[in-house]
Image (cartoon, rainbow, N blue to C red):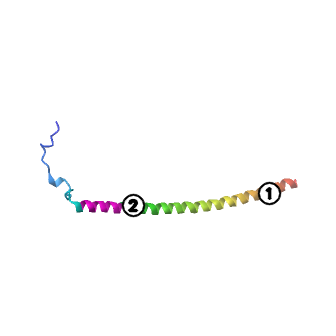
C-alpha cells in the first residue's frame, strides 16, 4: 500500500536549494541567462550553417568544373571516333 504524502516527512537536504521563485532579480537573471544562451546557440548555428553553405558552394564549383572537363573529353572522343570511322 503506497504511503500518503503526509505520512512521509519532507527531508530538506534531498531537495536542491533554489532561491525563492518569487525573487524578481533571480527570475530576471534566469531569463537574461536563458536569452544569452539562446543567442549564443543561434549565433553558433548561423556560423555552422554559413560554413556548411560555403563548403557546398565550393563543392558545386568543383563539380561544375569536372562536368565541363568530362564534356570536353567526351566531345573529343566522339570527334576522334567519327574520324576513325570515316577513315575506314
Q: Residues within 10 Å of mark 2 (few under 14, many from 20)?
A: few
Q: Residues within 10 Å of mark 1 (few under 14, many from 20)?
A: few
Query: Does 29 appear in magenta?
Result: yes
61 horizontally vs 86: left or right: left
* Residue lying furthest top: 1
Residue 28, picture quadrant = bottom left
Query: Does 6 appear in magenta?
Result: no
Q: Are marks 1 and 2 in contact (CB under 8 Å)?
A: no
The secondary element bearing badge 2 is classed as helix
Q: Position of residue 21 (x, y in %)?
A: 21, 56
The secondary element bearing badge 1 is classed as helix
3 horizontally vs 76: left or right: left
Q: Nearer the viewer, mark 1 or mark 2?
A: 2
Residue indicated by mark 1: 79
Kindly identify the residue that appears in the image at 14 percent across and 51 percent down: 11
Q: Position of residue 7 (x, y in %)?
A: 12, 42
Q: CA distance from mark 1 to mark 2?
A: 57 Å
70 horizontally vs 88: left or right: left
Kindly identify the residue that appears in the image at 72 percent across and 60 percent down: 72
Q: Position of residue 38 (x, y in %)?
A: 37, 60
Q: Which is the main secondary structure of the residues drawn in magenta?
A: helix
Quadrant (top left, top right, bottom left, bottom right) of the N terminus: top left
Residue 5: give its label: none
Kindly identify the residue that appears in the image at 12 percent across and 47 percent down: 9
* Residue lying furthest front: 24
Q: Nearer the viewer, residue 80 or 6?
A: 6
Residue 75, picture quadrant = bottom right
User: Which one is earlier in the sequence, the residue at label 1 or at label 2?
Assistant: 2
Residue 41: give its label: 2
State the count of labels. 2
Query: The magenta stretch spans which residues?
Result: 26-37
Amino acid at each position: 500500500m503506497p504511503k500518503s504524502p503526509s505520512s512521509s516527512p519532507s527531508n530538506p537536504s534531498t531537495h536542491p536549494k533554489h532561491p525563492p521563485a518569487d525573487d524578481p532579480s533571480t527570475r530576471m537573471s534566469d531569463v537574461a541567462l536563458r536569452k544569452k544562451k539562446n543567442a549564443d546557440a543561434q549565433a553558433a548555428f548561423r556560423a555552422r550553417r554559413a560554413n556548411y553553405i560555403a563548403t557546398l558552394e565550393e563543392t558545386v564549383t568543383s563539380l561544375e568544373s569536372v562536368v565541363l572537363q568530362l564534356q570536353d573529353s567526351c566531345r573529343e572522343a566522339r570527334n576522334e571516333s567519327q574520324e576513325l570511322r570515316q577513315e575506314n
